[in-house]
Image (cartoon, helix red, strand yellow):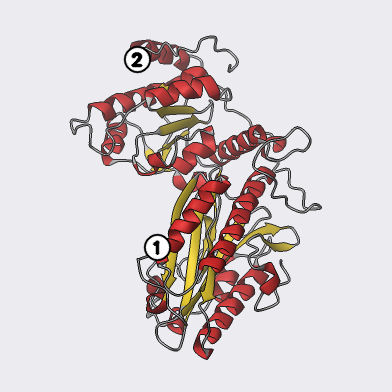
Amino acid sequence: MAPGFASLNPGYEFDALIRNAAMARKKAAEPRSVRPDDIDPHHRWDRPLQAPGHTQVDFEERVNFRRLHDYRLSRTRAALAHSGLGALLCFDQHNIRYITSTVIGEWARDKLTRYALLTGNGDPYIWDFGSAAKHHRLHAPWLHHDHCRAGLLGLRGAVGGDGALFREAAREIKALLDAEGVGTMPLGLDVVEPPMLFELQKLGISVRDGQQTLLQAREVKSIDELTLLNMAAAMVDGVYQDIAEALKPGVKESEIVALATGRLYEMGSDCVESINSISGERCNPHPHNFTDRLIRPGDQAFFDVIQSFMGYRTCYYRTFNVGMATPAQRDAYRKAREWMDRAIDLLKPGVTTDKIARSFPKAQEIGFTSEMEAFGLNFCHGLGLGLHERPLVSRLNSLKDPIELKAGMVFAVETYCPAADGISAARIEEEVILTPSGPKVISLYPAQELPIANPYR
């Protein structure tokens, strides 16, 4: 039970909240301070990064989830303190999990009905389905009981379009902002349905972009986050062994997807978000999907496994050849690997993202007329609770506005090279942790069969 709260029943009445808010305004809350120890990521660069078993045990420390929650909340508070915002209102599920350590499954990803609030002076609030809120009060002791509330914002219009739910929610949020002494400060917002934005603005709340503040908080991963990312990558290592054994003429792209999906859930994945399965003439240009195409002898085929373990995602491509490889296919793979190794070699703390972006081939080198057309084929993106986190490094966005890299950042580095035959292509992706001494690759399959020596394994 959270300190200072004696009941499992929040006993919430809106009118009472308004009265309490008015009283609280007479004595403004003090801003919450963040000590250096609060945002210490507890890195152990002198030790190998572990990928332990998935269950907790009493004879060794694996992932410390309470330390993980405290770190994420402190990082958010520190970012908020330097943002000029008074509070953050989150509808992005990754931000909600980062701040509150609550989740109700992948179902919630696109519903925009769960939301969380964090002020610079207070502790996190979460609005959820009523039964989920009650579950949080019972099983999430790191949250104050009366901060776990039933909420509903229309399920993207399905409930009705009169706006009453949004008006009531906006009034509740305004009362909390006033009660915690930040009612006159800008409110940071990540993603939202327009009616909610309108209702907040009608109450005189100045709404600003809060997504960049939250992505800044999520940039540097703690030891627990790195461990979870490494555990997730280890799961994909095993899936690629299964794919290599199953890949043969007559197998459908969709069968590989089914195989990988089932295997991941058996290993403990909490979400298989997407698996690209692409072969033969579908490789060029890259379609970013899968079909029921039958794989044939001589095909070049590549796959991407996007899944999460305890919320932490993978983005991990590998390219295979079925039965044989032509000179054009081999040449495409060699170039993709060389571009990959060149980019990884630059991933060091203190390096700016423009230098890495310049290491990637220009759009015209892979058959595109502009960097916008070629975006997403040769680039790096941050990896964590979200598939795409800061910093994102590409020729499209990084040459004019560079960011300095820091130890503890995690990247997915992707390269793509079309083959001279006009239909084949190679696609590779490595997951890389930035240590003080340089990059460490955690996507290990097939470690013993590297086509080009890679000193970062």
The reply to whether residue 28 is visible in this rendering is no
**In the rendered view of the protein, which quadrant contains the N terminus?**
top right
Label annotation for residue 254: 1
Q: Is residue 280 above or below residue 191?
A: below
Residue 296 percent location from the top left of the image: 42, 78
Which residue corresponds to the image point at 47% horizontal and 17% vertical from the top-left?
A: 146
Give amino acid for label 1. Ser
Residue 250, picture quadrant:
bottom left
CA–CA distance in space, label 2 to label 1: 51 Å
**In the rendered view of the protein, which quadrant contains the C terminus?**
bottom right
Name the side, left or right, on which 5 lies relative to 132: right
Which residue is nearer to you in this view: 317 or 342?
A: 317
Q: Is residue 414 above or below residue 313?
A: below
Which residue is nearer to you in this view: 255 or 27?
A: 255
Which residue is nearer to you in this view: 302 or 395?
A: 302
Q: Which residue is mark 2?
A: 14
Q: Earlier in the sequence, mark 2 or mark 1?
A: 2
**Mark 2 or mark 1, which is nearer to you?**
1
Give amino acid for label 2. Phe
Residue 434, picture quadrant:
bottom right
